[in-house]
Image (cartoon, rainbow, N blue to C red):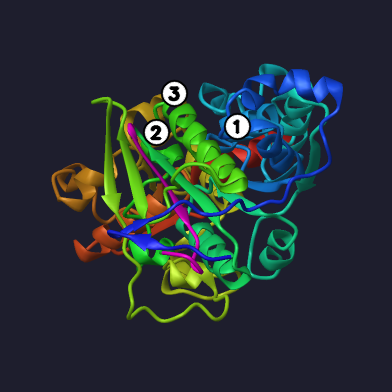
Amino acid sequence: MSTTFVENNIASLPPLVEPGPPLIAEELERYSRHALMPEIGLEGQRRLRNAKVLVIGAGGLGSPALLYLAAAGVGTLGIVDDDTVELSNLQRQVIHGVQDIGRTKLESARDSVAAINPGVDVVLHPVRLDSSNVLEIFADYDVILDGADNFATRYLVNDAAALLGKPYVWGSILRFDGQVSVFWAKHGPNYRDLYPEPPAAGTVPSCAEGGVFGMLCASIGAMMVTEAVKLITGVGETLLGRLLVFDALGSRWRELRIAKDPEAAPITELVDYEIFCGLAAAGDQTPEDDALIGVDELAARLAKRDTGEEDFVLLDVREPVEFEISRIEGSVLVPLAGIRDGSALAGIPRGVPLVLHCKSGVRSGQALEALAAAGYTDVVHLDGGIDAWLNAEIRART
């Protein structure tokens, strides 16, 4: 497969997938609106039915992407996810419903796809992608849609796709902002050309920490499917070499050019992406490990505090709205920003043990560092944050 470059623009690529067998009568009716367009036509629809697309994550971006891929008639849909449906997902993850709470997102997504188009073959991958399984999973698919919500997975997807010579469509959302592009290392730039290095751990909030405008998922997810269909059928101009940035609050799209870095080192192997992104790999010892306490230890210390056997302050370093949604009884809210800039230190006692927590442990670790720099000595933070605490409560009830 080859392509040409014209005035720094990547010209249309040839179709990624060969046409499958002729459509049967029911399919001719179902896909008639595609068939009426000469750019797609019956041949393009046969390419879609013959295509295998892998969607990473059945969450905010994966939800609309899977629904539209199924409706478009993509023959095989693979889904990678290891999470379950929660009530807070339903604000944006439209592939799931109230009746799916507690189910795996894979099962819920499979049923929703079948309800739209029973002719789609759905392959479930109930795993968390890592260097040990990504190449084997990717090998069976023509194109990958990356809706991952963390940087370690994004770099893993990019490098695996580059090693296998496969294109992938990438989308990202946070608050009111969305981004979407196509990466294909053998024909143009890849994700590392856009972001050569990951941001420092904890500097970019996740959607669970910073929030996300629910409708933004549909805008970016639909664009991701648009790019996948164009790659499969060979129509139009793809986003390879271009980045679309959407400001939902201002209702504005911007386009940025992405150039392949000629001096970038070639991607020749997979690495430890947790370490690459500044996160502690499983089993590795870090300086912060000594300052971590588990859920069981915190519960025991709270019980002792209630009886007067122990004295400490439990600080919640999340934002006020998070504190309103859920909290650990007996905690005191002191948002991270005030700890970092010093404005909240006057209200934090010295000479008393401090236990910090946030949502997952990232912000509490940052708060611990800031307090240590300010001279606080007896400070620990909760491993896994309030997520781990709530999960332990759920397990205790079941």
Q: Which residue is mark 2?
A: 211
Q: Is residue 233 left or right of residue 206?
A: right
Image coordinates for residue 253, horizontal then vertical, percent: 29, 34
Q: Residue furthest front?
A: 38
Amino acid tagged 1: Ser
Amino acid tagged 3: Met
- Magenta segment: 176-188
Q: Which residue is mark 3?
A: 215
Foreground: disc 2 or disc 1: 1
Q: Residue at x 72, y 51 (%)?
A: 18
Toward which corner of the image does residue 135 lie, by quadrant?
Answer: bottom right
Image coordinates for residue 127, horizontal then vertical, percent: 72, 54
Decide: few, some or many residues near mark 2? Use Cα within 10 Å; few <14, some 14-19, many ≥20.
few
Tell me the CA gap for discs 2 and 1. Answer: 17 Å
Asked whether residue 95 appears in the rendered view, the answer is no
Q: Nearer the viewer, residue 189 or 212?
A: 189
Q: Are marks 3 and 2 in contact (CB under 8 Å)?
A: no
Q: Residue at x 69, y 20 (%)?
A: 32
Tell me the CA gap for discs 3 and 2. Answer: 12 Å
Q: Which residue is mark 1?
A: 63
Image coordinates for residue 131, horizontal then vertical, percent: 63, 70
Quadrant of image for the N terminus: bottom right
